[in-house]
């Protein structure tokens, strides 16, 4: 570890000085291990000159790893005490990186296209240690909001990470897996011990990452319909598609007609379909 990153003593000292006692409600578990930070930055493929968006920078543990790699960082933090202190932390630890860092104080779920458009360039990588209770909604929001992202690597609760990266037919496969797969193939990039956090959380974490596909799978309208089909199918995941898709596709005979012209067996269930299958249904509609 080098002096440019936050270790256990720095994290605790900073938190104490700011009068921050980490809250469960905001999923505040801060990384206190520079080796883990550097591993995340390396696995994310951050290189000098990249523009990285980081959600939930907290005290800056991961932020400083990203700036250390020479990247520009736009950080989005909901907690105003933390957001207010970050520029000073970056300036104190890595003076040369101060001008490559900015923070938006906002709920990540309330980011708008206008806020992204105001940035000098669109972010190209998402790197974050996401707050656990809202990690999936935040991820979906960002993937949708920033089509320029060429990829991302996020730390999430292990169970959630395995769900995001799950393949059709597996027991973890669900609506979040099918939707995440729209943007690219996801992989589990690594596991993280709970001991590298302060406070130590009650769950293990994993790193999940994706790389954007060379060309989008379909248009935004096709994506929206595909997501509607995914939601409907998984809302009644034990039912056959010919039944579960009726809320979107209409009465039984209409559903069967669409499924057959998409080449999908109407007696299958949601968990057996890939995102490509759902898109085929969208296109057959
Ligand atoms: N990145 C830091 C680290 O690795 O030490 C902190 C990670 S901590 C797991 C999650 C962070 O997300 C906290 O700083 C918390 O305040 C912030 N946060 C929670 N909900 C948020 C939201 N809806 N939008 C933006 N930030 C949020």
Image (cartoon, rainbow, N blue to C red):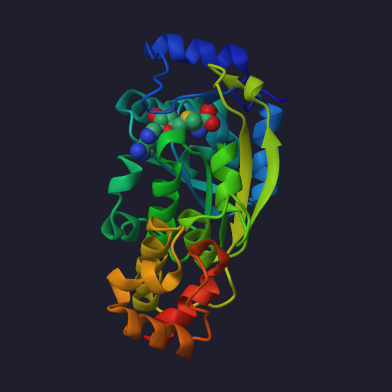
Does 264 appear above or below 28?
below
Could you say where residue 3 lies in the image, as x and y percent from the top left? Answer: 66, 23
Does 201 appear above or below 142?
above
User: Is residue 154 in view from this perspective?
Assistant: no
Does 196 appear above or below 232?
above
Q: Quadrant of ligand 1?
A: top left
Task: Name the quadrant containing residue 272.
Answer: bottom right
Does 18 appear above or below 157?
above
Residue ID at (38%, 66%)? 244
Is 214 in front, or is 63?
214
Quadrant containing the N terminus in the rendered view? top right
Quadrant containing the C terminus in the rendered view? bottom left
Residue ID at (56%, 34%)? 62
Residue ID at (51%, 48%)? 72
User: Is residue 282 in view from this perspective?
Assistant: yes
Could you say where residue 134 lies in the image, as x and y percent from the top left? Answer: 40, 40
Is 44 in front, or is 87?
44
Residue ID at (40%, 83%)? 256
Is 10 in front, or is 168?
168
Could you say where residue 40 lies in the image, as x and y percent from the top left? Answer: 65, 40
Could you say where residue 89 lies in the image, as x and y percent from the top left? Answer: 48, 26
How many discs appear? Answer: 0
């Amino acid at each position: 570890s080098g002096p440019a990153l936050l270790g256990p003593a720095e994290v605790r000292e900073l938190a104490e000085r700011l009068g921050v006692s980490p809250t469960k409600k905001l999923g505040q578990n801060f990384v206190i291990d520079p080796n883990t930070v550097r591993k995340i930055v390396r696995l994310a493929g951050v290189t000098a000159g990249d523009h990285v968006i980081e959600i939930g920078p907290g005290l800056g543990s991961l932020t400083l790893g990203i700036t250390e790699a020479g990247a520009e960082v736009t950080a989005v933090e909901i907690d105003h005490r933390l957001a207010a202190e970050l520029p000073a932390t970056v300036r104190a630890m890595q003076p040369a990186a101060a001008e490559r860092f900015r923070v938006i104080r906002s709920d990540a779920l309330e980011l708008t296209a206008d806020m992204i458009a105001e940035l000098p360039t669109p972010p190209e990588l998402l790197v974050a240690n996401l707050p656990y209770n809202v990690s999936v909604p935040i991820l979906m929001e960002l993937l949708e909001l920033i089509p320029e992202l060429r990829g991302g690597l996020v730390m999430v609760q292990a169970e959630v990470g395995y769900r995001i990266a799950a393949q059709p037919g597996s027991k973890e496969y669900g609506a979040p897996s099918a939707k995440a797969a729209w943007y690219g193939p996801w992989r589990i990039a690594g596991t993280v011990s709970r001991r590298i956090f302060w406070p130590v959380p009650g769950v293990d974490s994993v790193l999940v990452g994706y790389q954007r596909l060379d060309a989008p799978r379909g248009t935004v309208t096709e994506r929206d319909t595909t997501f509607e089909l995914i939601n409907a199918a998984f809302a009644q995941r034990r039912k056959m598609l010919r039944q579960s898709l009726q809320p979107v596709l209409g009465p039984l005979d209409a559903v069967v007609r669409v499924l057959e012209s998409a080449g999908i067996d109407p007696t299958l269930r949601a968990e057996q379909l890939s995102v490509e299958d759902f898109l085929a249904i969208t296109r057959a509609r």
